[in-house]
Amino acid sequence: MRGRLDGTLDRRAVRATAAVAVGSALALVLAACGSGGGTKDGGGGAGKGGSTAPTVRLPQLKGEKLQVTAVWTGPERENFVKVLDEFEKRTGATVDFVPSGDDMAGFIGSKVAGGGPPDVAMLQQVGVLGEFAEKGWLKPLGGAARAQLAKNYTKGWQDLGAHKGTAYGVYFKASNKSLVWYNARAFDTAGAKEPKTWQDFLTTARTLSESGVEPVSVGGADGWTLTDWFENVYLSQAGPEKYDRLARHRITWTDPSVKQALTTLGQLFGHKDLLAGGASGALQTGFPTSVTQTFSGDAPKAAMVSSADFAAASISQTKAKVGTDAKVFPFPAVGARSPVVTGGDVAVALKDSKAAQALLTFLASTDAAKIWAQAGGFLSPNKELDQAAYADGVMREIAKALIAAGDDFRFDMSDQAPASFGGKPGQGEWKDLQDFLKNPKDVAGTQARLEKDAAKSFGR
């Protein structure tokens, strides 16, 4: 099965020159937003972000019941429920949202085994979509959903939702994972500047530490945050070709390039004075807290947090205002250039029903994307979405950079792997990098464990 998946992933490989162009464009737009520009509100109300008239026709489904699952909690769940509420209003269907927890593959597997899978699931991993398709759990997209995809998505995003030439998924939500959010007041107090290189980043962290605030917040209790740290360092340092090869396990995790990336990451993880709460504190901090503690109150527990654009949803739970109190810069260049890593959530049907297909059609439309874009903390790969719909200038500019990239992006490495390696709490890459955070001097041991787990999951 893995060899067949590799053929699909090969088509997703991104040209290095294009990734560079995207990274440069992102740096420019974030610089504008970070300095206070581009923050004029352009969404969130009637008449903003384009016409409020529906752009997609949906069937009447009165009396139909639909169960949807996703990993989202807190403000992300609340905003997704707004999308589902609009679907209910237009169709008459009743939608029940069920949180899956971080182990989506395990959750779905147990539901399938019990004979009661949800109608629609929002998967976070390309590898999981392929595995589910191989097992026959997924239902192909219907004609209406495919028509919306063809109209609103580039070929690259369409291909990510397909397996062996069959379209199964709609990428409703995308993410830029190569960002660092920071507390503007903490930076001003310390006299710190936005760093452009990894060495500048470490220097800035030490400057912040000397000013009396713990520099970097890490949500190590959620292992996927650590894979994002590794991927950004690795892509920038080793380059896109090796990134693609490691993602497909075409080179081993004992490769010298992995040693170099872990050693570099250890320059941060190995200094407890640079981490909020030290390594032990980071390992007890979940992702939402890693964000909110950076922006809560007059005495925040950290000054910076490396997180995707969706951190804006958690920031909204504090009094900090994105673009003013909470600013953002591109992940610093470890090698010659800053990395550009993306991720996304793909909607798939596990039941062959009219209601499930209608929801996938809706999620592929600009109507659905606009609802969450106006609510904030959301990035859409839908190229036809009016960017005026985004709730603030920062998100609007990040969205512009994503759309400008077209099909030229590098997808999250762990999300391309089988779930047993790249997508399960307490095992595989998540656990191995948590152990590395605990003991960042053990580079060789970490490599050996990563390779053992990868080889097992990839069937080699």
Image (cartoon, rainbow, N blue to C red):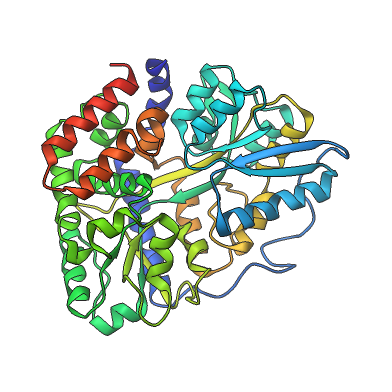
Q: How many marks?
A: 0
> Hey, which quadrant is residue 199 in on the image?
bottom left
Rendered residue at 35%/30% (across/down) = 421
Q: Is residue 344 visible?
A: yes
**Coordinates of residue 409 in the picture (x, y in percent):** 40, 42
187 vs 101: above or below = below
Residue 406 x %, y %: 47, 44
Q: Position of residue 183 (x, y in %)?
A: 36, 74
Please state if 80 lies on the left or on the right of 324 as rendered: right
Q: Quadrant of residue 209?
A: bottom left
* The C terminus sits in image quarter: top left
The correct choice, above or below, for 153 with respect to 352 in the image is below
Q: Nearer the viewer, residue 63 or 134?
A: 63
Quadrant in which the N terminus is drawn: top left
Q: Is residue 216 above or below residue 187?
A: above
The x and y percentages for residue 140 are 64, 23
66 on left or right of 177: right
Q: In the shown orientation, is residue 192 left or right of residue 151?
A: left
Asked whether residue 14 is in view, the answer is no
Q: Is residue 310 above or below residue 345?
A: below
Q: Which of the pair 199/41 is nearer the observer?
A: 199
- Residue at the spot 23% in from the left edge and 41% down from the top edge: 239
Residue in the picture at 75% in, 60% down = 51
